[in-house]
Image (tube, coloured by chain):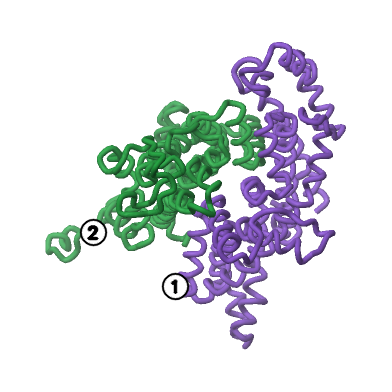
Chain colours: A purple, B green
Amino acid sequence: MARFIVRRIINVIPVAFIVLLVTFSLIHIAPGNPAYAILGEQASPAAVKLLDQQMGLNQPLGLQFVEYLRHVVEGNLGYSLLDHQSVASLIVSRLPVTFELAVLAVILSLLIALPAGILAAYRPNTWIDSVSRVLALVGAAVPNFWLALLLVYIFAVSLHWFPSLGWIPLSQGVASNLWHVILPVVVLALPLVAITSRVLRGELMEVMRLMYIQVARSKGVREWGVVMRHGLRNALIPVVTVVGLQVGGLLGGVVITESIFSLPGMGQLVVDAIFNRDYPVLQGSVLFMALVVLAANLLVDLCYAWIDPRIRYN
Amino acid sequence: MAVFVPEPILEEGLVQPVSSKKRAWRRFTRNHLAVGGLILIGLFILMALAAPLIAPYAPDTTHFGQAFHPPSSAHWLGTDELGRDLLSRIIYGARGSLLSAVLIVALGLVVGVPVGLVSGYYGGWMDEVVMRVVDAGLAFPGLVLAMAMAWILGPSLMHAVIAIGIVTIPQFARVTRGQVLEVKNREYVEASRCLGASSLRVMFRHILINAATPIIVVATLNIGSALLSVASLSFLGLGPPPPAPNWGGMLQSGAEYLTMAPWISIFPGAAIFLAVLGFNTFGDGIRDVFDPNHR
């Protein structure tokens, strides 16, 4: 296991290097001087010159990249052009909101997807399976910003059950915090429900055909026990992987959801950075999100190898 | 591949040979959801092509006196904040949305497939390098990277297409490489090499043709997600600038008036949802045809 972990971590290093290369190059895809892309076409030459100096954009590209690498390794993601706050501290201050949304979305999605997937596999081609399939189709096709607006219109504007926007920190009361995040969490959870329930259904149906399931049945284990104890346990392994691989999609969803519900998280930080033309914040946030996805993928691989020893030896 | 049926049976007319295409079509038509998806796609394409003929009003004509009219017999889906007919704007908006989604997938295919093909075929250090680049590409949350690129390039439909297209390239490269690895050691590929075929010919004529099915399935399913991504960028103000009708942008401008005129956001969102649903169910259907074990 130790060898597998070391090998997998070594594999991540070149990928992380390329991720850094991409985030560094982002601003250079714009034609002409990058300072104009940041400040806008109408920027004065004086402002452009100042930004060139401030961000080192007048240095040779290679040198700029080496400097960028050095800063990132030191934990310095640059400074906001708006208020000169450190990007790293901005990200850290926004992280709890996004983290809470993501965790609650995953929990809610599992609470719906596990029973839906199990029942659909247990009774394939029945109305339960059809309902689960329709839920999955809708979840995969519905635009999250549209769903967010529909939920706001129905549950906040018309029924007044939930607030339409805003954020109450957990420290000021768990109940009021949950009250504010319930609609955004539903929006984030639905695509996860779609994927997880269908993958679980497929895996469980495969597992239920295997020999050890027949053995368990012939030993007189009750059908529900066979499904839950023998089937589900093995079918869940690929589901863990699928959930882990959704982190990137979840972060994309967070951007939209936080901006609609005015939640002060990472997503809102990205959207604000774009509208305020605050490039260092945008660049730092994109890099941070990519590194989070890499870390999540690594964690999933390690969990997978821990659960299923065959992976370590292949 | 034709089914072998002994001659005498055929002559007696007891069994008719069924071509694989016919069998695939039969399997597809048995899947009602997939057929529904195909019909939906057909309707949207028809709507985009015949927009000037079927749209009741010009999409950009403003009538300030008719702003915020709810759905009525004069304006089936109501009017927006500038008094423009929503139905006409949704019909015209189908053009940009469908075209951009297809272009995004085309960009992903044109770059991603050759990269995956060469990487999988030659293997070795080149494959290692390409796969690390693909891993890095897949590490970025697609929408966030596309947002950053679209902002840097400037808001326009073409820039949104380029930004999202670049983000989809790694997916196609990975799927193609996986297929190439499965196919490249088969006997017919060996035979072609022994007969002196060039690497280029082996790759494109023998490997790619036989690895194409999963790539087509992924491409179809990707049109749906490309549609969603374009709409998301437009919703965030990074799509085509107004007054060009596009579904995501219409939804965004309607969001401001959600309490007084919910139809301005509800109907464009429904159009995006139905179009994505169409491509997803159609994609699922053709995957089931080519890979029945997937179900």
**Seen in the image, is B66 located left or right of residue B253?**
left
Give the amino acid type for the residue marked by disc 1 in the picture: Asn
How many other residues sit within 10 Å of disc 1, few (<14), some (14-19) or many (≥20)?
few
The x and y percentages for residue B34 are 37, 57
Return the chain for callout 2.
B
Secondary structure, mark 1, is loop
The x and y percentages for residue B235 are 54, 42
Residue under label 2, please give it.
Answer: B5
Q: Quadrant of residue A309?
A: bottom right
**Residue B23 in sight here:** yes
Distance from the alpha carbon under mark 1 to that under mark 2: 34 Å
Q: Nearer the viewer, residue B100 or A278?
A: A278
The x and y percentages for residue B118 are 53, 31
**Residue B185 in sight here:** no
- View extreme (front): residue: B65
**Residue drawn at 69 percent across, 11 percent down:** A45
Q: Nearer the viewer, residue B104 or B134?
A: B104
**Residue drawn at 42 percent across, 55 percent down:** B281
Q: Are marks 1 and 2 on the same chain?
A: no
Residue under label 1, please give it.
Answer: A125
**Seen in the image, is A187 located left or right of residue B241?**
right
Q: Nearer the viewer, residue B275 or A214?
A: B275
| Residues at marks 1 and 2 touching, judged by CB atoms closer than 8 Å | no
**Seen in the image, is A237 located left or right of residue A191?**
right
Q: Is residue A19 above or below residue A172?
A: above
